[in-house]
Image: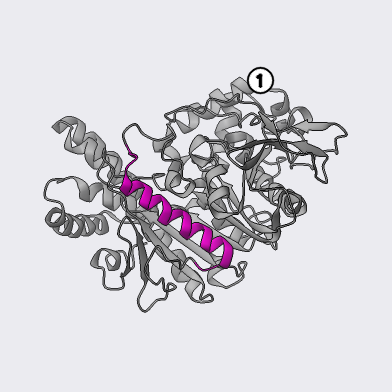
Amino acid sequence: MNKTGVVLTKSGRVQGFIEEGVESYKGIPYAKAPIGDLRFREPQSKEKWDEIRDCTQFGPIAPQHQNDDPKIELPEDEDCLFLNIWTPASDNKKRPVMVWIHGGGFFIGAGSRPRSDGAKLASYGNVVVVSFNYRIGALGFLNLPGIPPNLGIQDQILALKWIKENIEVFGGNPDNVTIFGESAGGQSVAILLAIPSSKDLFHRAIIQSGNANPKNFEPKRSIDGGKEFIVKLGIDKENVDELRSVALEKIIATQKKIVGGILNVKSSPFWPWMDGKIIPEQPIEIIRKGDNHQVPVMIGYNENELGFLSEILNNSNVVKKKVILKFVRSSIQKDMMSKEDLEKLIVLYREILEKRYPDNPMLFWSEILSDSMFKIPIVRQLEAHATHQSKIYCYVFSYKSPKFGFALHTFEIPFVFNTIDKNDAAEGAVEISEESKKLTNIMMNTWITFARTGNPDNEKIPKWLGYNLEKRSVMKLSVNPELIETNDDPLLKAWNGIL
């Protein structure tokens, strides 16, 4: 292993390794270990160290009940607040900085997943790429009196502060920082765009399959979840200090009982909530008033985020199909619409999509659920931004997956990082071909150009116009990219007055 030179940060000296011309620094602590008395406390800056810290291995990931496939092959530990840096050189070039915030429903995931390895992105774009872990699940988002709110978001803010103070010695520009994230990472970016405590910590924002939908941040479910959590642990609500001595395994097992699997993420209580302090009010309302950080924003979704649902339905017997559709109906209706509104949507979606995709008769179900969770809330956020900002861009990611036929949730990530060769997605979902390599170049150029200039326009795609309420222009990022005007889309208009 070829070591880098020693880099002096404000926290202490670090040394990483060089591979294929990129310097990698892994497992840099940006906060004190949130263990013992610091469990369920605000994150605190790490004390300065005197030794040269070896940063050639990722730090542990946040404790979680992994039900993802493939599993993250790294140890789990409460001492998880580490970040990772990939840079062409630790010099004085002041390159654009791209900070990745991982997804996973706020209860799984890590900044060290193979598909978000930043080496190729840093090399290709001559940028500095950073990722980090933050507390997730109950340890990061438990809502109980006596526990500071939204600790996972507070971790993210402290990580961004560390980056602002130290990234220059790694060849980055602290005055040109782009935050980008997918799913829960995209939700995090939406929150950071709005809240006061993240001011001046970044200068551009990319939201991938995330949004500021107010249903996501209502405090009731986190309050109810907090109560259920301590009841299951047998702790009196007046003695929350006892939580700091509960075995970690018991905490993770208890949250698993409450959350279940990733399909229940919409009802998970361990999620950011509007607390009046860290998240003072609904992020979407802050954006509607124009009080959010006025930075360029690129936000988008994948063409069929939950497309796996139609495949399951098409291959299910009558009994199983009935059970699944009952779950889907309740998932759509629960927070946002009446039974009558849903029936109107079903008729319209079925009529349009059965003509477009006659070989996939159940596709309209996955489209309705995907749109309710991703596309339509994203459109509402775009509408809020467009009232006050002009540098707003919307995309839809399209890829003909050899396994699913569409780009599902998370499928854009390996194209952004040029990690389509990593075994870190559903088996057979992505193949290495001339087409996928071309799409990788399109995605990397778009993300890098936006990070560099605040405008995603580049030579790999058609002229990209900003989003406005007249044309609602959306860039279809595919092997053959095109700019689409969506203002007359009947499936878009169908949601007016519903969501």
Residue 26, image quadrant: top right
- Does residue 440 belong to the magenta stretch? yes
Q: Please indicate, yes or no, whether residue 282 appears anywhere in the rendered image.
A: no
The front one of 249 and 58 is 58
Q: Secondary structure at mark 1?
A: loop
* Number of dots carrying numbers: 1
| Disc 1: which residue | 247
Magenta part, dominant SS: helix
Quadrant where the N terminus is found in the figure: top right
In the rendered image, the residue lying farthest to the right is: 50
Magenta part of the chain: 429-455
* Residue located at (59% from left, 35% from top): 138
- Does residue 475 belong to the magenta stretch? no
Q: Amino acid at mark 1?
A: Ala
Q: Position of residue 107 (x, y in %)?
A: 53, 36
Quadrant where the C terminus is found in the figure: bottom left
* Residue 368 vertical position relative to residue 54 in the rendered view, above or below: below
Residue 404, image quadrant: top left
The front one of 499 and 11 is 11
By what rule are the colours in the image chosen?
one colour
Tell whether 148 sits left or right of 123. right
Residue 430, image quadrant: top left
Q: Please indicate, yes or no, whether residue 32 appears anywhere in the rendered image.
A: yes
* Residue 268 vertical position relative to residue 482 in the rendered view, above or below: above
Q: Position of residue 184 (x, y in %)?
A: 51, 46
Q: Position of residue 277 (x, y in %)?
A: 69, 55
Q: Position of residue 248 (x, y in %)?
A: 64, 23
The front one of 426 and 38 is 426
Q: Label 1: few (<14), some or many (≥20) within 10 Å?
A: few
* Residue 254 vertical position relative to residue 159 in the rendered view, above or below: above
The front one of 428 and 24 is 24
